[in-house]
Amino acid sequence: MSIVDLKGKTILVTGAAGFVGANLVKRIFKEDPNAVVIGVDSMNDYYDVSLKEFRLNELTKYSTFNFIKGNIADKALIDSLFERYKPQIVVNLAAQAGVRYSITNPEAYVESNLVGFFNILEACRHSYDNGSGVEHLVYASSSSVYGSNKKVPYSVDDKVDNPVSLYAATKKSNELMAHAYSKLYDIPSTGLRFFTVYGPAGRPDMAYFGFTNKLVNGEKIKIFNYGNCKRDFTYIDDIVEGVYRVMKKAPDRAKGEDGLPLPPYAVYNIGNSSPENLLEFVEILCKELVSAGVLPEDYNFEEHKELVPMQPGDVPVTFADTTALERDFGYKPSTSLTEGLRKFAQWYADFYKTNDR
């Protein structure tokens, strides 16, 4: 692997107002207060825009953070950004997220996850036309690519040709597209399969956030597969630390026996490699919400839960094999579920109290 020195580099982060994106920008500036970061985000209303604005507002204190509101599916915009800023490191986190939304709104996934990612790849390709160009492209894939694979834990060496949602299909497509561009144009690229990211200021379409909203409103929550789902929940800081370490090491460029480039391409899982039963997860969440004062001391969780069958697009278990990440980057996510949910509950109490929920 090739060491990529991030100091003094211009870094493009797409999806910069997103959950992972905003936290990654903070991580970059923590390491290098003088970093130059270009952030792009469409600020769409797939979920509460005030959360994106909250995250973005926290980034305004960094004087060398430049934010551009725009859609990565806008080729002219992406080309102009590359022309103007000439980023050396590109982290593509912009995507239409969510499994269930892809069942009813497939067009959004084609636009952002396929057309948008194509525009990023093309811009990376042409960055070499008049100079050294992009040193490393890092992009978000997803544990969803494993579909309903029976073998666990999920390894990056597993065959992943049977997606159970369009979202998963677009993420697998990203990996295939990146491989082709790495091979054809010698672009060092690394895909990261994220496993159920959670934490403060996260996405409200994720189960833990949606459960919290319902419980606060006195509604019943539906726990799918009768509570027998298992998820490899990964705390946001662990995900971001993994992304940051990956940014600093790119796959090596090399020539094959035919004289053509061997693709400088890699894919890794980032997960806690410790799947938790969904019912137990919700019980811990309830306990921490009570401790944070979000729910009353005498809250009766049993009255507010409903065990229901599996829903379309979901899988019964996600479980990351992170041995490759540990081997190449000396890193393994380790935040416990109790610790992570405690931080979320405390943030939720502060945020919605401040915003007069």
Image: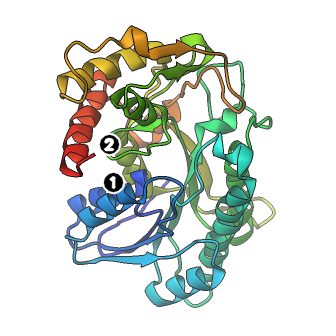
Q: Is residue 306 above or below residue 127?
A: above
x, y percent for residue 132: 52, 81
Q: Is residue 306 above or below residue 261?
A: above
Q: What colouring method underlies this structural image?
A: rainbow
Residue underneath mark 2: 237
Q: Residue at x 32, y 20 (%)?
A: 286
Kind of residue at disc 1: Asn
Instruction: Judge whether residue 204 can be spotted in this image.
Output: yes
Which quadrant: the C terminus? top left
Asked where in the image residue 145 lies, by quadrant, the reply is: top right
**Label 1: which secondary element:** helix
**Label 2: which secondary element:** helix
x, y percent for residue 307: 56, 12
In the picture as drawn, the residue positioned furthest to the front comes out as 218
Q: Residue at x 19, y 16 (%)?
A: 297
Kind of residue at disc 2: Asp
* Image disc number at residue 217: none
Residue underneath mark 1: 23
345 lies left or right of 42? left
Cα distance in 3D space between marks 1 and 2: 8 Å
Marks 2 and 1: in contact by CB < 8 Å? yes
